[in-house]
Image (tube, rainbow, N blue to C red):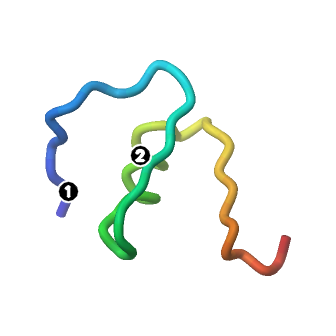
Amino acid sequence: MTFRRLTRLPKQSFFLLGVREVGKSTWARLQFPDALHIDLLDEAH
């Protein structure tokens, strides 16, 4: 389930902070599908 956010999307770089497992990465991928995504926890890279 996703919830509509009340804020506007940023027009430049930003930090997305919050506790684990609340949907930050999911939200970012849905809002910015063409953006570079770097997973610092992925040991394969």
Instruction: Between residue 10 and residue 37, name the one nearer to us.
Output: 10
Q: Amino acid at mark 2?
A: Leu
Measuring from the top left, give residue 42's x and y in whole percent: 71, 75
| Residue drawn at (15%, 43%) of the image | 4
Q: Which residue in the structure is indicated by mark 2?
A: 30
Label 2 vs 1, first from the N-terminus: 1
| Residue drawn at (48%, 49%) of the image | 29
Q: Is residue 16 left or right of residue 2?
A: right
Measuring from the top left, give residue 10's x and y in whole percent: 41, 26
**Which mark is on residue 18?**
none
| Residue drawn at (67%, 75%) of the image | 41
Question: Badge 2: how crowded within 10 Å, few (<14), some, or many (20+)?
Answer: few
Classify 38 as above or below 5.
below
Q: Which residue in the structure is indicated by mark 1?
A: 2
| Residue drawn at (37%, 51%) of the image | 27
Classify 27 as above or below 35.
below
Measuring from the top left, give residue 5's x and y in whole percent: 18, 40
Gap in angstroms between the C-alphas marked 2 and 1: 11 Å
Q: Secondary structure at mark 1?
A: loop
Measuring from the top left, give residue 2's x and y in whole percent: 20, 56
